Amino acid sequence: MLPLASDHLELALAPLDRVRARALRWAMPLSSRLAGAREARVAVVGVSVIGLAALGTMLAPLWLLALGPIVLGVPHLLADLRYCVVRQGWQRERILWLTAGVPLLAIALGAGFEIGLLGVAASALAIRGEAPGRRARLGRRAAVVAGALSLAALAWRFDTIADLCLAHAHNFVAVALWIAWRPRVARLHWIPIGLFALGCGALLLGVGDSLWSRTVDLPAGLDRATHLATLAPGLPGAWASRLVLLYCFAQAVHYGVWLRMVPEDDRERPTPRSFRASYRALRAELHPAILAGFALAAVGLALWASIDLVAARTGYFRFARFHGILELLAAGLLIVHGRRARA
């Protein structure tokens, strides 16, 4: 991003920091206690993310499904790149440009998910393992390779079903990555995990059935029939609507994981940053051209959505197919390599 534009953006964040400071003063002494207690603060953030996701799923699931990708999709792709790649330093491993970068690019251009899963296996074989113990390293590597190759075979055999399964599963992969992101010194992270599991179970047991039936429908392409056909094809009525609501809830939590929960856990210091400090850290870690590209993509997607929301949402998902595989790659590298010192 150009220095002048960057300076203007930092100035624009100053009023938000002033509002933030007043809110923290108003919330004292609780805010001061949470500021220095990462475990408790992340648990509070996680509960807030899950609560908002549940509220949106119950009150306006179709609007959440329609607007969530438009508003949060591009920022969460940027977070994927930042935390799964740059913060781990994987971009400095040249072999991963071949074993991971090429398959990800191929999927973004329309290739099948089996290509990406082959990339997961190849990356697990190529990267040096640093998990303790030679036998443990070999076992971890073999498990990731075998799992990735098995999934690749299934994806090749069941092409359309594979897309659907990954669409649902990648929401839960993000939660699993957050759980494993860093060593825990307390058990407070089990509170949001438990609430997330409770919410998923409640939706599958039919808690949202009556609300779904009373939901005001949206125009074609965003309506209930479209989501039932794309997210739960072939399932009987009640189970189909439950699966759509589960996807809606889990997708919203997935966005919250990458935009709020992982950033809180990944930061070196335990205290939170101001908006301007967060932006300066982002600018220091990512090339200005990358930030400019994501900014243009976010603005372009919003403008496209203002003209044709259905087409914009479809276009976003068509391009963003690669990020589910990126998260699986991050999980595989975490298993094989162990936790890596931050870049």
Image (cartoon, rainbow, N blue to C red):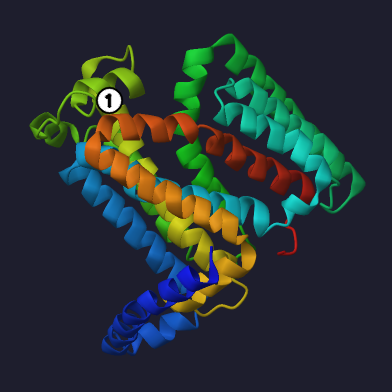
Name the residue nearer the viewer: 37 or 67. 67
Q: Is residue 239 visible?
A: no
Name the residue nearer the viewer: 110 or 54. 110
* Above or below 237: residue 251: below
| Horizontal arrangement in the rendering, residue 252 relative to residue 97 (left or right) | left
Which residue sits at x=46%, y=77%? 276
| Horizontal arrangement in the rendering, residue 50 relative to residue 37 (left or right) | left
Q: Is residue 219 visible?
A: yes
Three-letter code, disc 1: His
Quadrant showing the C terminus: bottom right
Which residue sits at x=34%, y=21%? 230
* Above or below 234: residue 79: below
Name the residue nearer the viewer: 308 or 334. 308
- How far across and down, in percent of the image, does residue 243 sit? 32, 28
Name the residue nearer the viewer: 201 or 78. 78
SS assignment at label 1 = helix
Classed neighbour count for the residue bearing mark 1: other residues with Cα under 10 Å, few (<14), some (14–19), many (≥20):
some
- How far across and down, in percent of the image, does residue 82 sit? 59, 56
Which residue sits at x=50%, y=83%? 36
Which residue sits at x=71%, y=23%? 149
- How far across and down, in percent of the image, does residue 12 sit? 36, 75
- How far across and down, in percent of the image, does residue 184 sit? 60, 65
Tag 1 residue: 227
